[in-house]
Image: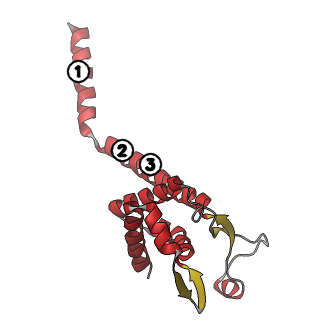
Amino acid sequence: MPMLITSLLLVFARLALMGVPQFVTLLAGGTVDVKGEQQNSLEFVIRTWTQWQSDVQGSYQIKVTCSAIAELLLSGDSRILPIPVRGKVITPDDGKIRTRSRAKKAPEQYTTVTAASKFFTCLIDTFSEEYEAHNSNHTLLDEFDDEDDDDDVRGLIFVYECREA
């Protein structure tokens, strides 16, 4: 199911990139049935998007969805930014380990934040993950790069030969 949702997020992101005002107007005018309750389409898509953005995989998909999120933020549309969405998990301070049976009895609760702040959080998380991945790859490449070591050895041999002469 997450793969289907993230694939659909890509479709909505492409639509948003084609034109934010048209995208918002299209979704704001419709409703969707969610578990027997009618919900505004725009609110449903934004809530779903913010909930599943962290599960988007693939360089292209991440770039497209992040670009669309940035465009939605830059639009400053008052129909998008104040939408209440799911924030962080509220962890109980009872000191007990959360087992499956306790989780069934008391499901996780979340804070509520605005779509604008959640979009910023999604962008920051994505950029920090990309930054860490880039830096870790750079470090690994440096460790396995033998050419620098050869240059250092040749330089030491040259210095040693000059001292003997």
Taking the spot 64% from the left edge, 85% from the top edge, the residue there is 100
Quarter of the N terminus within the rendering: bottom left
- Residue 64 figure quarter: bottom left
Residue 125 visible here: no
Indicate which disc residue 67 carries. Answer: none
Q: Position of residue 105 (x, y in %)?
A: 71, 88
Q: Nearer the viewer, mark 2 or mark 3?
A: 3
- Check the image and name the residue furthest to the top: 165
Taking the spot 46% from the left edge, 73% from the top edge, the residue there is 26
Q: Which residue is mark 3?
A: 131
Q: Position of residue 15 (x, y in %)?
A: 39, 67
Question: Could you tell me how far apart the alpha carbons at marks 3 and 1 are, in whole angstroms?
Answer: 38 Å
Taking the spot 26% from the left edge, 15% from the top edge, the residue there is 159
- Tell me if label 3 and label 1 are in contact, CB under 8 Å: no
Q: Nearer the viewer, residue 146 or 161?
A: 146
Quarter of the C terminus within the rendering: top left
Q: Position of residue 119 (x, y in %)?
A: 55, 60
Q: Closer to the N terminus: mark 3 or mark 1?
A: 3
Q: Is residue 96 left or right of residue 122?
A: right
Q: Which residue is mark 1?
A: 157
Q: Nearer the viewer, residue 13 or 148?
A: 13
Q: Which residue is mark 2?
A: 138
- Tell me if label 2 and label 3 are in contact, CB under 8 Å: no
